[in-house]
Image (cartoon, rainbow, N blue to C red):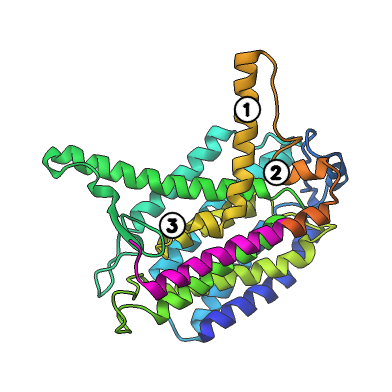
Amino acid sequence: MRALLLAGLLGLVLSLVLTPVLIWLFKKIGWGQIVRVDGPSAHLTKRGTPSMGGIGIILSAVASYFVAKMVNGEAPTYSALLVMFMMVGLGLVGFLDDYLKVRGQNTAGLKGVYKIAGQILVATIFAWASLQNKDIFGLTPASTQISVFRDTGFDLTKIAPESWGEIAIWIGAAAFLFWIYLLVVSASNGVNLTDGADGLATGSLIMSIGAFAVIGFWKFNQACDISNIAPNCYNTRDPLDLAVIAAAIVGALIGFLWFNTNPAQIFMGDSGSLGLGGALAALAILSRTEVLLVLVGGLFAISAGSVILQRGVFKLSRTFTGTPRRIFLNSPLHHHFEEKGWNEVTVVVRFWIICGLLVMAGIGLFYVEWIYGSVA
């Protein structure tokens, strides 16, 4: 418990100290935001605002986690290291994208195919590593079963009949990898698309990642190795440390929000959105609440869904009618409401409310499942 509180506090303090330094540095070297020409016209004034603030969030979170563990006299756990690997790995992919945008002074950045390739590479290493290093109870950080509040019993590696021999093994491995890819790419790109209004992604991530701090702490207190409340106890690897790294990230995000709120002095950039979206996916996978991410990270799913829907309707209408149509004035969805005349602050606060309601619904269902037993 002490490590959890210390990690959150240190993350906050380090972020409050480091972010102004990054603002000064990025202004000095000219690493400013490149604004989309097809975005809301009000956003044109944001051009030149320091970007890549996600570097400070990630550094603050990682440093605060290690310091908190050291002060508490504990060694870092394998599960927390996996979360940080995902966050730093995808953060590097985002940094490369940000750097290319700044250098070329356009919004092109890293080509989509290379960005997806980078996400898949990091996700593949994470998927392999998450099934290694069993603890004394035989638990690996991740499971090959699909999870909702806990493992459901539906094992992806056993979807093909055993009689198929080696082919069944390859099919199972491919299914597991695809599931991890889907979670990681969806979460990281969802956060990336939501990061389009001052403070929107930052505030939403505070709530969503904060939910996993709560879930990790609860699973620690109700773990099968320290309680006798089966069948409702949880077989989760290192749940308390998942809560600690989540708290460290939340603390860093709160510190960053001080400078990212409207009018933003700095943006997190792809360096932050991809890395933090990856951390969100990793926390869901390792806490064995993968499907619950649809609710806890619901706002990011809505943002991504609005873009997919907009592009799908545009391409289909152009193909079949010759006249491209759009269902939103702009996408992602928060830009649609800005185009309708909503003030940016109004959009952000209302989307925060939606995010908060979805997070509360997710935690509520998680608690209800614990009370009434596994629904798997």
Residue 266, percent from left and from top? 78, 57
Q: In the rendered structure, does residue 373 fall within the stretch colored magenta?
A: yes
Q: Disc 3 versus disc 1: distance between alpha carbons?
A: 29 Å
The residue most toward the front is 372
Apparent side of residue 96 relative to residue 140 in the rendered image (left or right): right
Quarter-of-image position of residue 238: bottom left
Please give the residue where the numbered disc 1 appears in the rendered image.
313
Bounds of the magenta segment = 351-376
Q: Please give the name of the residue rendered at 74% of the width and 52% of the height, measured from the top-left corner.
A: 51
**In the rendered structure, which amino acid carries the disc numbered 1?**
Val
Residue 20, percent from left and from top? 78, 65
Does residue 76 appear in the picture of this structure?
no
Q: Please give the name of the residue rendered at 46% of the width and 86% of the height, measured from the top-left corner.
A: 73
Q: In the rendered structure, does residue 54 fall within the stretch colored magenta?
A: no
Q: Disc 1 versus disc 2: distance between alpha carbons?
A: 15 Å
Judge whether 339 appears above or below 140 on screen. above
Mark 1 neighbour density, 10 Å: few (under 14) some (14–19) many (20 or more): some
